[in-house]
Amino acid sequence: MKVLKFGGTSVGSAERMHALVDLVVNMEAKIVVLSAMSGTTNALVEIADKLYSKDTAQANELISKLEEKYVVEVKRLYKTEAALQKGLNLIRYHFDYLRAFTLDMFTANEEKAVLAQGELLSTAMFHYYLSEINVESVLLPALNFMRIDENDEPDLEYIERHITEELNKYPGTSLFITQGYICRNSFGEIDNLKRGGSDYTASLIGAAIYAPEVQIWTDIDGMHNNDPRVVDKTHPIHELTFDEAAELAYFGAKILHPTCILPAQKRNIPVKLLNTMQPEAKGTTISDKASGSGIKAVAAKDGITAINIKSGRMLLAHGFLRSVFEIFERYKTPIDMITTSEVAVSLTIDNSKYLQEICKELEEFSDVTVDQNQTIICIVGDFGSETKGCALKVLEAMKTIPIRMISYGGSPFNVSLLVKGELKKASLVALNKGLFNY
Ligand code: ADP
Ligand code: ASP
Ligand code: MG
């Protein structure tokens, strides 16, 4: 069975849901993973914020505003009175559930339950619509099989066992619908796979059922060579390797959740990125096949903190890096980029939750300086077969922009640069010109 994921804009209105039918209803058996309708998760985040701060009036107002939007869509989604009533009851149920939180205490657990409502709504609405037009489908509750462990990592073994159990309940069924993004944690509470996590759900399900293909349907015709939100001219890249796509996703290409390529890669399942507004477009195929050489794309990741650690002890000292890394490990803080010189090491982190604690420990044996609001610019391609000149092209393109760090050679498919956050746009524009002639 293939796995098809449709993002927020692809289910963002009654019209979009009507249009989905042509893409999902055919002879092929499939699992369809849906996101919340676009804007919903952002609205739920805002509602949760108000509930946290006990701003009940504002929370109620936001809940009613979102509910009105859903009522409008539901009225346009269904034609028969029976389906409309079912849809309106569904909405009432979920919005009454949200309103109940204004009367009760609100903690991180309740917040996760609030954030889950978007995907629960969109999947049930679409499932009811299929039933209204006499298309048979089964709604699989993701909360019955999607699970993260105590480190917040997906538990693939658990997912595999439980989704198989669920699927086996419905022999002969060829169309399953399920929620992206939502899951349970190791305590069995409702949780999620972080923002943009529906892509991750699709890849995890693909891996769990050994799917022949995972398709990520969105609002653009595949992975582009540069961030279309930042630069004017970009083009789609038709083929990427898993490694290249994983780098781009991790370093800011929003079209893919940062870690969603890994489960598919683990089981060598091709991932296609396709456009719901233009289904005939070729999109991007991500697989293990080598696909051309040279520089293919750039992406940028904001909100990075750079830490410079300088120590006399580094000179000729073995074990220095180990003592540095141990500190980051203790605070469960991953390091993204690292560069070294004889007397100092610079590294970057994305999660600065424990920055103070980490710096305090580093200061016990070194001088530490911190630069916040940095951006990693990641340039991806196959540099192995065209080693000559790639770095030069990148640096030539960036010649007017000050670079804080350069990381090259960690893998044959990535060069990363660190620049000040305010230089992100200038960097992406310069690279678009220098590397892609735009
Ligand atoms: P969905 O709601 O379908 O998950 P997203 O908004 O998460 O869609 O991802 C699609 C968006 O990603 C595109 O509209 C585009 O603006 C943005 N994006 C950022 N970088 C890239 C890139 N390199 N290629 C394609 N899209 C990108
Ligand atoms: N609805 C979730 C979000 O907006 C998950 C997703 O769309 O992938 O982050
Ligand atoms: Mg997304």
Image: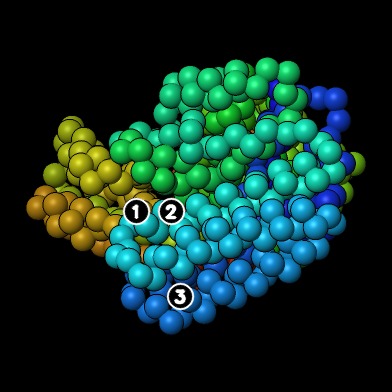
x 47%, y 60%: residue: 97
Report the residue marked by disc 3.
59
- State left or right for residue 344 relative to residue 230: left
x 23%, y 46%: residue: 331
Report the residue marked by disc 1.
109
Work out whether mark 1 precedes mark 3 in sequence or the reverse, and give the earlier one.
3
Front residue of 204/189: it is: 189
How far apart marks 2 and 3 lie (CA) works out to 15 Å
- In the picture, the disc for residue 113 is 2
Dots 1, 2 in contact, CB < 8 A: yes
Question: Compared with residue 386, is residue 333 higher up or lower down, i.e. above or below?
Answer: below
x 33%, y 76%: residue: 54
How many numbered dots are placed on residues in this image?
A: 3
Find residue 191 and report its horizontal and vertical position in percent: 42, 46
The quarter of the picture where residue 327 lies is top left
* Dot 2: element: helix
How far apart marks 1 and 3 lie (CA) works out to 17 Å
- State left or right for residue 83 relative to residue 123: right
Near mark 3 (Cα within 10 A), the count class, few <14, some 14-19 or many ≥20, is many
Residue type at mark 3: give it. Answer: Ala
Front residue of 10/325: it is: 10
Near mark 1 (Cα within 10 A), the count class, few <14, some 14-19 or many ≥20, is few
The quarter of the picture where residue 174 lies is top right
Residue type at mark 2: give it. Answer: Ala
